[in-house]
Image (cartoon, coloured by chain):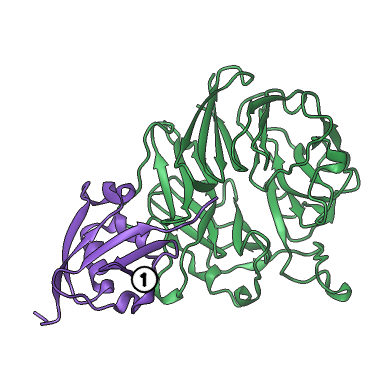
Amino acid sequence: METLLAIGTRKGLWLARSRDRRTWDLSGPLFPVADVKAIGIDLRRGTPRLSAGVLNSHFGPTVVTSDDLGATWSEPDDAPVAFPADTGAALEGVWQFAYGPEPDVVHVGVEPSALFRSEDGGRSYQLVRALWEHPHRERWEPGGAGKVLHTILPHPSDPRRMSVAMSTGGVYRTEDGGHTWHPSNSGIKADFMPEDQQYPEYGQCVHKVAVDATDPDRQYLQNHGGVYRSDDGGASWRSIAGGLPVDFGFPIVAHPHRPEVVYNFPIDSSMMRFPPDGRCRVYRSEDAGATWTGLAKGLPEAGFWSAVMRDAMCADDADPAGIYFGSRSGEVWGSPDEGETWSLVAAHLPDVFCVRAAVI
Amino acid sequence: MDAAVSTVSVGLPSVLRGLAEGKARVEVTAATLGEALDALARRYPGLERRLRDERGTLRRYVNFYVDGEECRRLDGPATHLRPGTEIVIIPSVAGG
């Protein structure tokens, strides 16, 4: 069994491969000096297709794909993701790839907040108009990272159903294949609003959402303050932060196979964006967030003045699952045993924006 | 043909030449810088989006020198071209 771990950073893409998930061969940088905020690994194909959102600070954003596990990359002549002229908008970056139940259908989430859909396996994309034309859009405000649609959760079997999340804006759902979208933030706090307006219908700064391995209606959410769970497909949310040391953070990752297992990387607070006491610890719940356990074996016990961004933690699809995260300080850590033990995959890289892993 | 249309040369930085059949210099016929870029876009669509976004806005960190002057100090994309004008495209200062 060989595992591929793709690492997107502020200055390019690195690829790591391993047969034991403890020792890794690292190659890169690909696309040097470009932001790589999104990586997709499409496992629905014989050879997985890799996609990357690449933002060159001189020459702008694009999407590139590889059908040989990263040896060569290509893009179409015409821009793969571009706003139609009548929108008056221009693509500023790609933040997410998502693969649902329909073969060759791929979605991307972009900045400024919008959803695009591909029906050719991710070579070219078209704007999902109904979300772009949503009457709420003018009130979606940029967060610290810009105004981005960073999370896309296709239902695993029903192509009509999908959730997306934006910062800010919050969670929106469709149940009719993207023709209509409704906000889905009931119970999620917006602590940056005046006290009597902290539970709005929309406008939350949701950082990341993940879907449970076996129950698509069970979702886990890391908010800009607050960690939540929904058991009704996102219709309502309740806190599962009680067992965590703090409730701020960016990523949240569901186990690929085991129900009720979810991972999180707590950050002290919005005003103190480091793990509590500078201890590098991943937290795992095995009961859908009722209780949490800190996992630190092999991770720095002190002096970790760094953070993990919203897409910089992931799981592979092996059994037992591998869990990975990358830091703003350019370290990438991996666990071949579901978080029990950790070892360094790479160090001294640029800030890590995203990681994605799969058995190849 | 519009009398104001001129044949001009466009110099490309090495990092972009792969999108233009490896050429360092391309000749186009146009009346303005914007039209010259339109002509480049028709020939090399993969080059176009490195120079302008989908609204046609010049990328902020790409400079377009027209006979030695950066176009934003002239008339931007409306900068008029004369026969033999040299346009030179140079990445500006960005990144970190």
Q: Which chain is green?
A: A
From the image, state the color of chain B.
purple
Which residue is located at x 18 percent, y 58 percent? B26
Q: Which residue is mark 1?
A: B56
What x and y, as percent, mark residue A90? Answer: 46, 67
Which residue is located at x 59 percent, y 40 percent? A350
Q: Is residue A163 above or below residue A193?
A: above
Query: Which is nearer the eye, B14 or A25?
Result: B14
Horizontally, residue A167 falls left or right of residue B81, namely right
Q: Secondary structure at mark 1?
A: loop
What x and y, as percent, mark residue A48? Answer: 45, 34
Which residue is located at x 85 percent, y 74 percent? A194
Q: Quadrant of residue A1?
A: top right
What x and y, as percent, mark residue B41? Answer: 26, 63
Chain to which mark 1 belongs? B
Q: Residue furthest front?
A: B68
* Amino acid carrying mark 1 in the image: Gly
Horizontally, residue A29 falls left or right of residue A284, namely left
Horizontally, residue B95 falls left or right of residue A302, namely left
Q: Quadrant of residue A259?
A: top right
Quarter holding the N terminus of chain B is: bottom left
Horizontally, residue A32 falls left or right of residue A347, namely left
Query: Which is nearer the eye, A204 or B15?
Result: B15
Decide if residue B35 is in sight here. Answer: yes
Query: Which is nearer the eye, A203 or A152?
Result: A203
